[in-house]
Image: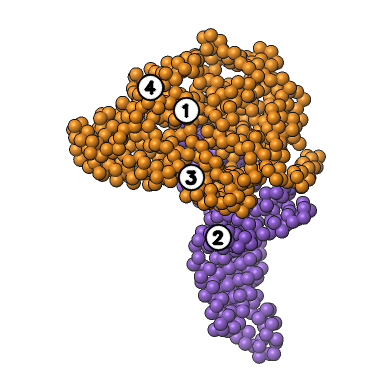
Chain colours: A orange, B purple
Amino acid sequence: MRKTRCLVAAAVFVASMSGAAYAQTLVYCSEGSPEGFDPAPYTAGTTFDASSRPIYNRLVQFVPGTSEVGDGLGLAESYDVSEDGLHYTFHLRPGVHFHTTDYFTPTRDLNADDVIFSFERQRDPDNPWYTYTPGITWEYFNSMSMPDLIESVEKIDDLTVRFNLTRPEAPFLADLAMDFASIVSKEYADQLQAAGNMAQFNQRPVGTGPFVFLNYQQDATIRYRANQDYWGTAPQIQNLIFSITVDPAVRAQKLIADECDIMPYPNPADVAMLDADPDITVEQQEGLNVGFLAYNTMQAPFDDPRVRVALNMAINKQAILDAVFQGAGQIAVNPIPPTMWSYDADIPDFPYDPEAARQMLADAGVQNLRMNIWAMPVSRPYNPNARRMAELIQADFAAIGVTADIVTYEWGEYLERSSDPNRDGAVLLGWTGDNGDPDNFLAVLLGCDAVGNANRAQWCNADFDALIQQAKTISDQDERAELYRQAQVIFHEQAPWAPIAHSVVFMPMRNEVQGYVMNPLGLHEFDTVTIAN
Amino acid sequence: MLRFLFSRLALIVPTFFGITLVAFIFPRILRGDPVLLLAGERGVSPERYAQLQHQFGFDRPLLVQYLEYVWRLLHGDLGQSIATKNPVLHDFAALFPATLELSLFAILFAVILGIPAGILAAVRRGSIFDQLAMSTALAGYSMPIFWWGLLLVIVFSNTLHWTPIDSRIDVMFYFPTVTGFMTVDALLSGQPGAFGSALSHLILPTIVLGTIPLAVIARQTRSAMLEVLSEDYVRTARAKGLPPRRVIGLHALRNAMVPVVTTIGLQVGVLLTGAILTEYIFSWPGIGKWMLDSISERDYPVVQGGLVLIAGLVMLVNITVDVLYGLIDPRIRHA
């Protein structure tokens, strides 16, 4: 029976591929395979592109094309926050249907039970879904401090649910717009649990999102059809296909050959070629990221801010931008990108002045300095070629009499060693924002709690930390922005990093693809896309 | 024959344990912590780190981990991928048919072209054909797979547009997986054009993966045939007036086949190794990329499971080849 259903679904899909429908199929050459289709256990954007973005919704969602949480854009029509910031009450949208597929037919609409289940399974170790497949972990839920933050999630009525927090947390709404907070179907989970087939939850997903999952051929293709029952505006395209193509050069060739309609992450060197193709449009957007060189502020002589500032003044950032980013980026001054609210545009960058830098080092009593520069072994949007960047910085430092040795390790080892407070030298690394909140950069990368961990500068400044901790507890965005601006001033004075660059993200697509909205968080969504004939 | 078979099978047990030990130790020798890789740039607090180490069982003594791993392995449990959370066997079963299909086509390509080329080169020893075939074989044997694959893609896919760039079939074809062999499933689907599309996607990967085995088989066939053709019984057969086709096809070829079958058997290991690179070049969704990713992610269960499964397959093929010897040449099983 199941096989027959599968064949019928396949026949329907094939039939829909003919004529006009064929033209309404979007082929996205994705850069990798999803780890699974339940977004909550994972942290990779590639997985979210294939799971949470097409298949699921969240209580609150970002305004398309921005990293700001919009009102009424998600499964909650509205929400109230208590005066003390400890209680968030969400009023769910009525009449939201979960997907009907060949493996699940919902008997009810979305309700508060689904919301509670979506969080309890990540929060409560006694919930059978907490370990529904061996080795499962809830990394985003944990790393966003949700276990400590959420005291309880309670059902007020079928369409009202309340989150009770242990402390006020201003970024909480932005956190709920993240992929780990996608709302899943409790009815589907119950059905799978009763059938003793819980692992299917991660392989054959059911959500409320704009696309319905059809099929995944591992490491090859993922197929979806448009959700015609979607509570929002139903997608204009009828079919969505992810054609998994790991190599960026091959993705570019497939785009040129019209084997796919849109692709992410081109090689920087291929962008000009793609842009010159009359059939291809290359859209671009400033990425919500920062690439930096983090000194170990616990180790001499980098514990002296004068030394750090001197080294910052020796780095020719424009040369790095030209050579490493092929000009596709912006020089970084602050630890947060300019597109983020609270960015302080009044802070000037340290001038590139090798002579002054040499003098400053001498004034600080530093002579014949020899140090390590750590170069990441992997390419990231915030640093496409760390080795080249390290070589340029090495030459810049040599010009002021500092001898730098470049060291690199395998990626896992790099992450491990670079977190060590006893580590030597300065580390090249970076960050891409999760939710558009400044706290997601400043606290995660520079907070005292993150020393020995994501705070690669091992920098704990009491004044800076007090400001970002205070900003977390205030709900008024203007007040928060002011505190973050003050924090950026301290960062600039203390210079625990040399912020290097914010990269630009490119998205090449065939000219027929219209209405695509780039996501500053680096995710890829296709519900607004149309294909011109 | 049974005694011969048992003597071969007895060798499997120590080899199997040797493989499990290598598969267990190998990923642990490499530095890099799977828990930290899971956390990425964000890092992980010491408490959470300890919790995850415990959850994955990495905090126990290595000997305990190994014994538990072997125990589960003997019960058919290869563990769960740390990255995807899927059972290793599930992922292997989903991906292996693609590798197997490509390997079968490559070995078929190598055998169908390699054996006749070797025979012809031996029969016409010293001719232009012989020199050309053996020079080509030497070039094929020396060719780095990655370079060869990229060259073919640039010429036939990017420039001439004769062959598809990558993957197993045009994405517009969609049918349920029945056998996992795209060519067979395409035929079963009955969709016009699907089989042709699957075949066209196999052309370049087959050539790339089959080139080295082709060269080896052609050279081995030539050398074995030359040896057999100089034997007394072949001369006698010719003297008795048997037609050349019968002398070569019946008397010479069968005896020359023993070393050739050995060579073909040994090529299975070469094919699986070569498949890793070939799959990467052509975005072929087989076990090659899966294994490579697991090594870079320090996904211990996948590295261990993949190694054991692949080594087990190679062992199986070698045992089969040994048995085939016995069938082709009765002297071997009585030795």
Going by the numbered disc 2, the residue's amino acid type is Ile
Q: Mark 3: give few (<14), some (14-19) or many (20+) Cα within 10 Å.
A: some
Same-chain check, marks 2 and 1: no
Q: Which residue is mark 2?
A: B154
B290 w.r.t. A431: above or below? below
CA gap between label 2 and label 3 equals: 28 Å
Please tell me which residue lies in front, B241 or A319: A319
Q: The N terminus of chain B is located in which quarter? A: bottom right
User: Given this view, does label 4 or label 1 mark the residue nearer the observer?
Assistant: 1
CA gap between label 3 and label 1 equals: 33 Å
User: Given this view, does label 2 or label 1 mark the residue nearer the observer?
Assistant: 1
Q: Residue at x 57, y 13 (%)?
A: A81
CA gap between label 2 and label 1 equals: 43 Å
Q: Which residue is mark 4?
A: A487
- Residue under mark 4: which chain is it in? A
Left or right position of A298 against B270: left
Going by the numbered disc 1, the residue's amino acid type is Met
Q: Mark 1: give few (<14), some (14-19) or many (20+) Cα within 10 Å.
A: some
Give the structural element (helix, strand or loop) at label 2: helix
Asked if disc 2 and disc 3 are in contact, CB closer than 8 Å, the reply is no
CA gap between label 4 and label 2 equals: 52 Å
Asked if disc 3 and disc 4 are in contact, CB closer than 8 Å, the reply is no
Going by the numbered disc 4, the residue's amino acid type is Ala
Please tell me which residue lies in front, A208 or A393: A393
Give the structural element (helix, strand or loop) at label 1: loop
CA gap between label 3 and label 4 equals: 38 Å
